Amino acid sequence: MASSIKISRLISRSISSASSSTLFSRGGNGGYRGGLLAKYSTAAVVDEQPIKPLVQVEHTGLLIDGKFVDAASGKTFPTLDPRTGEVIAHVAEGHSEDIDRAVAAARKAFDIGPWPKMTTYERQKIMLRAADLIEKHNDEIVTLETWDNGNPYEQSRQVEIPMLVRLIRYYAGWADKIHGLTVPADGAYHVQTLHEPIGVAGQIIPWNFPLLMFAWKVGPALACGNTVVMKTAEQTPLSVLYTTRLFLEAGLPPGVLNIVYGFGPTAGAVLASHMDVDKVAFTGSTATGKVILLLAAQSNLKQVTLELGEKSPFIVCEDADVDQAVELAHFALFFNQGQCCCAGSRTFVHERVYDEFVEKAKIRALNRSVGDPFKSGIEQGPQIDSKLFEKILRYIRSGVDTGATLETGGERHGSKGYYIQPTVFSDVQDDMPITKEEIFGPVQTILKFKNNEDVIQRANNSKYGLAAGIFTQNIDTANTLTRALKVGTVWVNCYDVFDATIPFGGIKTK
């Protein structure tokens, strides 16, 4: 749920990686490459035989009323391996009839099923069992996530799946801690409030962090006793499919959690406008979020929660340790191939340290390891699909055409798959498209600022307001910027610090 709470953390951020046992085999000449040995200039890194995952794709049908079923139309669509563009599997393509079936199952499960009437302790136990099963099947889920999404295997294994488990357990813990109030009132009246489940929750999630988005949406809805119809992103259905099966194995009653895969106009729009859906939650683009709001209003005025686009500022102050600032700014932007809603995609650097920062940021980007995300030591895998791949390259060309200096990168990496060289621009101006618009890729734009007043005005000059980062050794500077920035979350001397207990949300068109 969107929040206006600001979060500041005066800590430093470090990332460590370790090799681990995996469910894949090395093909061709593809041995493990570590750290700086695999620079993006070495095209052979991604042109070698890709590692073959050994996990089996067990389910490709829609989950409706506790069963995996074909789409009513019989149609399927391919989900692709972003490393190669090749088909992994064909999954059922949901349309309006399938949304109707899923909503009917969720409505039945809510109105006459056991889930909302179950004791909160019993609901909690089922969710905790699901978390235990996810932990048990960690290797299979991680492999599917990396195969379908392209994010580095080590990132999935060490960050995303542990966070998924943590989130499910956290929300399970809330199931028996939701209380009403007794309210004093004038007169001889007894007044009490109750918190009750909303009903059928429609949920639409993006592809960049499928399992974390799944947990953030499904976890609180189930803990409160709601039933769910979720539309996953068409690019990444596989890991959610597998995880959902584990919820059924944990004892989740039929119809409580329904999953439909499909496309926005033919599935997502139907869900958002459905008259028997009581609330819709959406994470994705700002343009689509506006459509969701309109559809909700035109149907039954259902409640809506949105988390949308961003162009987050990352501010490097004049007192910064430049080496540390370069590393953190690099992480803030390039994490997950730049495919992050709160990526620090506008890097503001004080004029005193600007030239040194640019040179070191260029070197760090040149040393970023790009390649098959299943290989140990790889920091950057492919972009999600050809559509985003081409969009990012168009933005890079726009940066050059509008006068920014291309310090490094700017081209495709390798000859197959959706890999892009880590790209750094300097001499970037506020009115350039690469500064104003969400690129969602590995493109760092570095802007120069003079003082606090200058950077506050320019950082806030955006239609977005989700997050920001500050790098400084001065507590007064940190406090001044934290209070002045018009965003929901501010990270100080760290970035992308998420926890189940920390609220996350923004303001403006976030």
Image (cartoon, grey):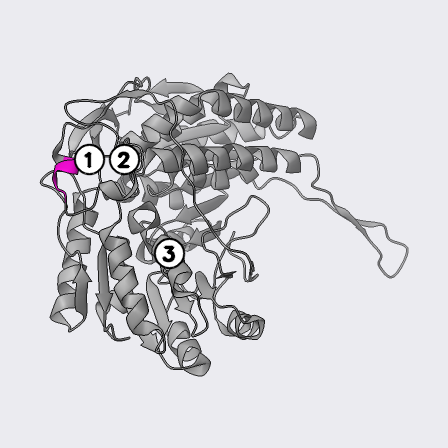
Q: Secondary structure at mark 1?
A: loop
Precedes in sequence: disc 1 or disc 2: 1
Which structural element holds mark 3? helix
Q: Which residues are magenta?
A: 42-46
Of circles 1 and 3, which is in front? 3
* Separation of marks 1 and 3 at Cα, in angstroms: 26 Å
Q: Mark 1 or mark 3: which comes first in sequence?
A: 1
Instruction: Give the secondary structure at mark 2.
Output: loop
Answer with the quarter of the image where residue 64 lies. Answer: top left
What residue would you read off at disc 1?
83
Disc 1 vs disc 2: which is toward the camera?
A: 2
Tell me residue 158's x, y (percent): 44, 35
Pointer 2 residue = 373
In contact (CB < 8 Å): disc 1 and disc 2: yes
What type is the residue that disc 3 sits on? Glu
Does residue 187 lie above or below 377 as drawn? below
Q: Which residue is mark 3?
A: 327
Q: Is residue 45 magenta?
A: yes
Q: Are marks 2 and 3 in contact (CB under 8 Å)?
A: no
Q: Position of residue 104 (x, y in %)?
A: 44, 29
Q: Which mark is residue 421?
A: none
What kind of secondary structure does the magenta stretch mostly adopt? helix
Label 1 Cα neighbours within 10 Å, binned few <14 / some 14-19 / many ≥20:
many
How would you rate the neighbour count of disc 3 (Cα within 10 Å): few for under 14, some for 14-19, many for 20 or more? some
Residue farthest along the right direction in this orientation: 188
Residue 61: image x %, image y %?
31, 22
Q: Is residue 401 above or below residue 260?
A: below
User: Residue 315 location, x and y as percent?
Assistant: 41, 68
Q: Compared with residue 287, is residue 477 higher up or lower down, i.e. above or below? A: below
Which residue is at the front of the view, 317 or 298?
317
Determine the residue positioned at 43% across, 41% down.
Answer: 16
